[in-house]
Image: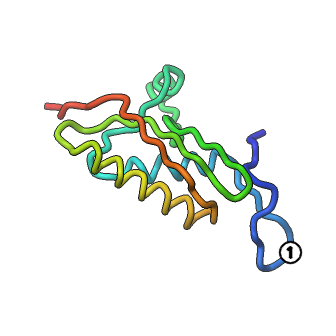
Amino acid sequence: MTEMNRDTLENPSGIGEVQIANEVVSTIAGISAAEVEGVDSMAGGLTNELAGRFGVKNLSKGVKVEVQDDSAIVDLAINMKYGYNIPRTCAQVQDKVSQAINSMTGLTVTQVNVRIAGVALEKE
């Protein structure tokens, strides 16, 4: 069973509680980071790389999320495309990930830490 990041979200209807799994927050972070121009892919460990070769898609690859109360800390490992400005691209990743998580879950993102794991050259 996937760990839930918080017990109860603000639910205006009052009918019941809403829970969001940490995996959902990780997936949101991974997808939004991969959409930034200059990001080639998310960097994952050996397990993620092997799973990808067998057709298993892990959208939270290279993402670690720590949630406490109503705030989140996100750690991302990305592969950059060659020729892009690393500080500018990382700032765009931080903004996009923070906004996506906040708008979709209501969590306040206090940190988005980006680690450049590699640089991908253009494929010919």
Q: Is residue 6 left or right of residue 96?
A: right
Quarter of the figure with the N terminus: top right
> Which amino acid type is marked by label 1?
Ile
Of residues 13 and 106, the one nearer the viewer is 106
26 over 79 or under it: above or below: below
Q: Residue furthest right?
A: 15
Q: Position of residue 93 (x, y in %)?
A: 39, 51
Residue sitting at 49 percent across and 35 percent down? 62
Instruction: Report the coloring of the rendering.
Output: rainbow
Q: Is residue 19 left or right of residue 26?
A: right
State the image quarter where residue 9 is shown: bottom right
Q: Is residue 120 left or right of residue 14?
A: left
Q: Residue furthest left?
A: 124
Q: Position of residue 111 (x, y in %)?
A: 53, 49
Residue sitting at 47 percent across and 42 percent down? 113
Q: Provide the residue designation for mark 1.
A: 15
121 over 30 or under it: above or below: above
Secondary structure of residue under mark 1: loop
Q: Position of residue 96 (x, y in %)?
A: 42, 58
Q: Is residue 117 left or right of residue 103?
A: left
Quarter of the figure with the C terminus: top left
Of residues 63 and 57, the one nearer the viewer is 63
Residue sitting at 42 percent across and 32 percent down? 43
